[in-house]
Image (spheres, rainbow, N blue to C red):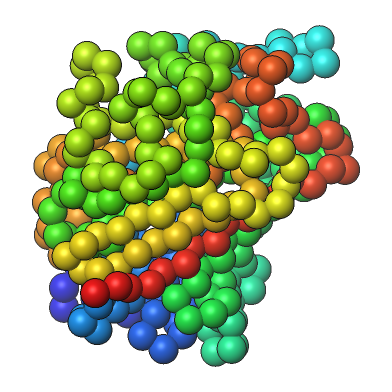
Amino acid sequence: MSKILILFCFTFLSLVSGSKLGVYEIKRGDFSVKVTNYGARIVSVVLPDKNGKLADIVLGYDTFEEYMNDKSYFGAIVGRVANRIAGAKFVLNGTLYKLDANEGPNMLHGGKKGFSQVAWKVEKHKKHEKSPYITLSYHSVDGEEGFPGDVRAYVTYALIEPYKLSVTMKAKVFKKATPVNLAQHSYWNLGGHNSGNILSNKLQIFASHITPVDKQLIPTGKIASVENTPYNFRKPREIKGPIKDLPEGSKGFDINYVVDGRKGRKMKPVAVVYDEKSGRVMHLSANAPGVQLYTGNYINNVTGKGGSIYQSHAALCLETQGFPDSVNHPSFPSQIINPGGTYEHCMLYTFSTKK
């Protein structure tokens, strides 16, 4: 039996700190999503192309061991604070909090043991409902990775209509104020996870501005227009075109966009991706103020599902989020949640095909 069949055929296969790990499916017709409670990760999304041929369109691995050694956050919920925090520190209510630095002097995606690298609890798994869903939770204790306060985080993955995947991330905060910024970190290749690079995909992002960064990819605090820059995806364009015009040393995109109409918490369009060969289209909407475009620049000879070898630009990430390093930039939308408060971050992926 192949490794991938071993992973998907058995409910519980491994233990992390005494917690059982499993893979859980939600399915609606020929549309299916598999999730593991290790990092609350999406491990597969299978749906048809324009000719009805099924394919898995997210990057991932065959075994839990590979996910535990993963450095790319394949499919994970990242937090307590997604993206980067400069100097791995911030001041809140007059107290300096020193965090777990895991990218040079900075913190990335919650530290060395962020939410992506722990076992989540399966709260509910309704795979036979009209709208099948799974809800997972994780309790992050006061002081974990240096953050103040207890946080109970939740994520629900649901198939709410044919070819619509809803992702709802919530968190309740106890005892102390703390930053919360969760992100879903799937790597998408609409042609199929093993179909090569995404450079010919056409991408549209509903954002007129970005948050520029320094050489360590830390925001400068400014908000800049995308007009007359390679970051302009306000109209659909191939990803490969503007890469050559990026700053020297850039291998691709890794930048936060300021989503148009970001004020308020209503759902709004974020991006559209189109793969001409398969005909698959992905529309993303969310209620977060920003979205990180990452084009898999540093994937290099990674052995993925079915023995596939993933290379640079094998997929793209569209991580809706609060702005990176918001805890150190008072002008950015706040990520601070007070005791008794609730954080809520909603995403909706709508898939379709066109000839």
Relative to 298, residue 86 above or below: above
Q: Which of the 4 image quarters holds residue 232?
A: top left
Picture quarter with the N terminus: bottom left
Q: Nearer the viewer, residue 188 or 1?
A: 188
84 relative position to 351: left or right: right
215 relative position to 112: left or right: left
At horizontal 48% and vertical 81% (from top left) the residue drawn is 162
204 relative position to 347: left or right: left
Residue 29 visible from this viewpoint: yes
- Picture coordinates of residue 327 (x, y %)? 66, 21
Q: Nearer the viewer, residue 161 or 91?
A: 161
Looking at the rendered structure, the number of numbered marks drawn on it comes to 0
Residue 37 visible from this viewpoint: no
- Picture coordinates of residue 166 (x, y %)? 56, 65
Picture quarter with the C terminus: bottom left
At horizontal 21% and vertical 82% (from top left) the residue drawn is 51
- Picture coordinates of residue 346 (x, y %)? 63, 55
Relative to 214, residue 16 above or below: below
At horizontal 50% and vertical 19% (from top left) the residue drawn is 224
Relative to 225, residue 144 above or below: below
At horizontal 50% and vertical 37% (from top left) the residue drawn is 207
Q: Which of 33 and 122 is in front in this view?
A: 33
Relative to 200, residue 50 above or below: below
- Picture coordinates of residue 341 (x, y %)? 84, 43
